[in-house]
Image: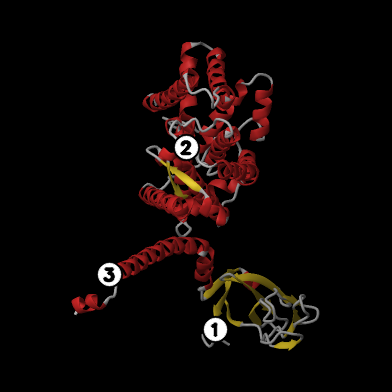
C-alpha cells in the first residue's frame, strides 16, 4: 500500500521536504505550547484563586446579630462585596452589593430606605433587591440569612433567586 | 530585509565564537520577559520576602518563572564573558570597532550591577548578607565611599529602603541605561560587520569564505538559541532556584556565605590581599589592582592598534591570557577556600 503510494509521488525530494517542514512546524508548535501553558497559568493564578474563593456557599459573620435595626454592614461573600441589612421591623436581608448595571458597589441609604448606586443613579428595594428606578436591568442577587445568638449566617440561595 | 540578504558572515575555524553575542542578547530577552512576569507579583519593601515566597510556592509555575530568571541571569553573564574574551582574542576591538568594545564592556558592567541589585530583591538571608558585604566594599573609597554607601542603602544598614532602591535601579534605571547602549552596540555590529581574527585577516580576500546572514547564519544563530533555551529549561526545571530563610539582621551570617560567581574573583583577591597586608592596606591594594586592571582592559583599543600585528599584538594576547587565567584561578581558589 505504502509502496504503491511512494511510486506515485512525482519526486521523493519534495515529499521529504514537506515532511521535514511539517515535523519542524509540529516541533515549533509543541515548543510554543510548552511555553504558553506555564506562562498562561502563571498570569492567570489570581483568577483561579478568586474562582476558588467565589466558590463559597456560606459565610458566618460573627457578632453581626448585634447590628442595630435600620442599619447595614458590608462584607465579602467569596470575593464579592455583599450587604447585610437589619430592617426597622426586625427582618434581615442579604444582597449582593454589585450593581447589575455596570458593577459599581451600591450603598444602603437608611434615611431613604433604599439601595442607591452612586455611579448612574440606580435604585433598588432594600428588602427584595428589586430594581426600582434608573438603569439597572436586573434585581440584586439575594442570599439566605439565618440569625443565631452568636452570628449571622449568610448562604447562597439554593433556588438561585 | 534587503539589507539582511546582502549582509554576510565570515566562515572560518573560529566562527563558533560569533554566536556568543547573539546568545547574550537571547538571554537578555529572556530576562526582560521573565522580569515582566515577576513584576506581576513581586512587591518591594517590607513585603519583599513574602511576595517572593508567594511567587515560589503559591503561584502556578511561579517557581519556574523565578528559576528561569535566575538561571538566565547567570547564563547571560557567562555568554557575555565568553563573547568579550573572544572579541579580545580576535582583536575585534581595533579600529574601527573601538566603540563596539567600549559599549560592550559597559554592558557587561551594567549586567553585573543588574545581577547585584537583583540578588537582594528576594530578601532572604543570603541576599541580605551578600548585599551587606558588597556595600561595605564601597566604604574603602576614601571620603566619598561611606556617604555613597549610605545613599545607595538608604541608611546605615541594608533594610526595606535598600530593597526599594535596588528595585527602582533593577527595573527602571538600569534598563533605561542598558537599552540605548545595547541599541548602539547592535547598530555598530551591523555597521562594521563581523571582525576577522588576525589569522583570517592575513589571508587574501579570495582565500576567505563567507555565508549570507539571511538565511544561512540566522538559521544557525536560531539553532544556537534553541540549544541555549533547552539548556536553560533543563537547568531551571532540574535545579529550581532556592529561597532561603527570611533575612533577619539579628541572626548571624550563615556559614559559607559568598557572592555570586562573577564577583568571586574580586572577593577572593580582597580576601588574599587582606591576609598578606594587614589592615585596610590589603583591601585598598586589592581594589587598586582590580581598578587598574579594569581600566587597562577597557582602554585596550587605545594602545593596541590594527596596523601593528607584531610584538605589540602578542603583548595584548598575553595580557588577555593573563587576565583570563587570573580570573579563573582566583574564582576557583575562592570556591575552594570557602
State left or right for residue B180 relative to residue B115.
right
Q: Position of residue A77 (x, y in %)?
A: 58, 72
Label 2 Cα crowd, 10 Å radius (few <14 / some 14-19 / many 20+): many
**Residue under numbered circle 3:** A12
**Residue under numbered circle 1:** A157
In the image, what residue occupies the spot 67% across and 35% down?
B154
Chain hosting mark 2: B
In the image, what residue occupies the spot 54% across and 78% down?
A155
Q: Position of residue B133 (x, y in %)?
A: 54, 28
Q: Is circle 1 on the same chain as circle 2? A: no
**Residue under numbered circle 2:** B83
Question: For this rendering, which residue is in front, B316 or B326?
Answer: B316
Q: Position of residue B126 (x, y in %)?
A: 48, 36
Badge nearest the viewer, 1 or 2? 2
Give the total of numbered labels: 3
Whether B59 is drawn above or below B284: the answer is: below
Q: Quadrant of the C terminus of chain B?
A: top left
- Distance of mark 3 from mark 2, alpha carbons? 43 Å
Question: For this rendering, which residue is in front, B43 or B209?
Answer: B209
SS of the residue at dot 1?
Answer: loop
Q: Position of residue B335 (x, y in %)?
A: 39, 28
Chain hosting mark 3: A
State left or right for residue B200 relative to residue B32.
left
Q: For residue B33, say whether it is visible.
A: no
Amino acid at each position: 500500500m505504502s509502496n504503491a503510494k511512494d511510486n506515485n509521488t512525482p519526486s521523493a525530494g519534495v515529499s521529504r521536504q514537506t515532511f521535514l517542514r511539517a515535523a519542524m512546524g509540529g516541533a515549533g508548535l509543541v515548543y510554543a505550547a510548552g511555553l504558553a501553558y506555564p506562562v498562561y497559568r502563571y498570569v492567570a493564578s489570581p483568577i483561579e484563586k478568586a474562582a476558588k474563593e467565589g466558590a463559597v456557599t456560606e459565610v458566618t459573620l460573627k457578632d453581626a446579630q448585634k447590628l442595630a435595626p435600620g442599619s447595614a454592614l458590608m462584607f465579602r461573600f467569596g470575593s464579592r462585596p455583599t450587604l447585610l441589612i437589619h430592617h426597622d421591623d426586625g427582618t434581615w436581608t442579604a444582597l449582593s452589593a454589585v450593581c447589575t448595571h455596570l458593577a459599581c458597589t451600591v450603598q444602603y441609604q437608611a434615611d431613604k430606605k433604599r439601595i442607591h448606586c452612586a455611579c448612574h443613579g440606580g435604585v433598588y428595594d432594600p428588602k427584595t433587591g428589586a430594581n426600582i428606578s434608573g438603569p439597572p436591568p436586573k434585581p440584586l442577587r439575594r442570599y439566605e440569612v439565618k440569625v443565631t445568638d452568636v452570628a449571622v449566617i449568610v448562604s447562597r440561595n439554593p433556588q438561585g433567586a | 530585509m534587503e539589507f539582511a540578504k546582502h549582509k554576510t558572515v565570515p566562515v572560518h575555524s573560529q566562527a563558533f565564537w560569533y554566536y556568543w553575542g547573539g546568545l547574550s542578547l537571547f538571554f537578555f530577552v529572556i530576562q526582560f520577559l521573565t522580569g515582566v512576569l515577576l513584576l506581576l507579583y513581586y512587591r518591594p519593601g517590607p513585603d519583599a520576602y513574602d511576595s517572593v515566597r508567594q511567587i515560589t510556592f503559591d503561584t502556578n509555575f511561579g517557581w519556574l518563572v523565578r528559576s528561569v530568571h535566575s538561571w538566565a541571569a547567570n547564563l547571560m553573564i557567562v555568554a557575555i564573558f565568553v563573547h568579550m574574551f573572544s572579541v579580545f582574542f580576535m582583536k575585534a576591538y581595533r579600529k574601527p570597532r573601538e566603540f563596539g568594545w567600549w559599549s560592550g564592556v559597559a554592558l557587561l558592567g551594567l549586567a553585573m550591577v543588574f545581577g547585584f541589585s537583583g540578588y537582594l530583591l528576594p530578601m532572604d538571608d543570603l541576599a541580605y548578607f551578600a548585599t551587606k558585604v558588597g556595600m561595605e566594599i564601597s566604604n574603602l573609597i576614601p571620603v566619598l565611599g561611606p556617604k555613597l554607601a549610605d545613599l545607595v542603602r538608604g541608611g546605615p544598614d541594608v533594610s526595606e529602603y535598600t530593597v526599594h532602591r535596588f528595585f527602582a535601579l533593577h527595573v527602571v534605571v538600569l534598563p533605561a541605561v542598558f537599552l540605548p547602549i545595547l541599541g548602539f552596540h547592535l547598530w555598530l555590529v551591523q555597521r562594521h560587520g563581523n571582525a576577522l581574527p588576525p589569522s583570517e585577516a592575513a589571508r587574501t580576500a579570495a582565500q576567505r569564505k563567507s555565508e549570507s546572514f539571511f538565511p544561512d547564519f540566522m538559521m544557525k544563530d536560531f539553532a544556537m538559541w534553541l540549544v541555549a533555551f533547552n539548556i536553560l529549561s533543563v537547568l531551571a526545571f532540574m535545579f529550581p532556584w532556592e529561597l532561603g530563610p527570611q533575612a533577619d539582621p539579628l541572626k548571624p551570617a550563615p556559614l559559607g556565605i559568598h557572592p555570586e560567581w562573577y564577583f568571586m574573583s574580586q572577593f577572593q583577591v580582597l580576601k588574599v590581599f587582606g591576609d598578606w597586608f594587614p589592615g585596610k592596606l590589603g583591601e585598598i591594594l586589592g581594589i587598586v589592582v582590580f581598578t587598574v586592571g579594569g581600566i587597562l582592559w577597557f582602554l585596550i583599543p587605545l594602545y593596541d592598534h590594527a596596523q601593528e600585528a607584531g610584538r605589540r599584538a602578542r603583548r595584548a594576547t598575553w595580557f588577555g591570557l593573563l587576565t583570563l587565567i587570573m580570573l579563573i584561578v582566583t574564582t576557583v581558589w575562592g570556591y575552594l577556600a570557602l
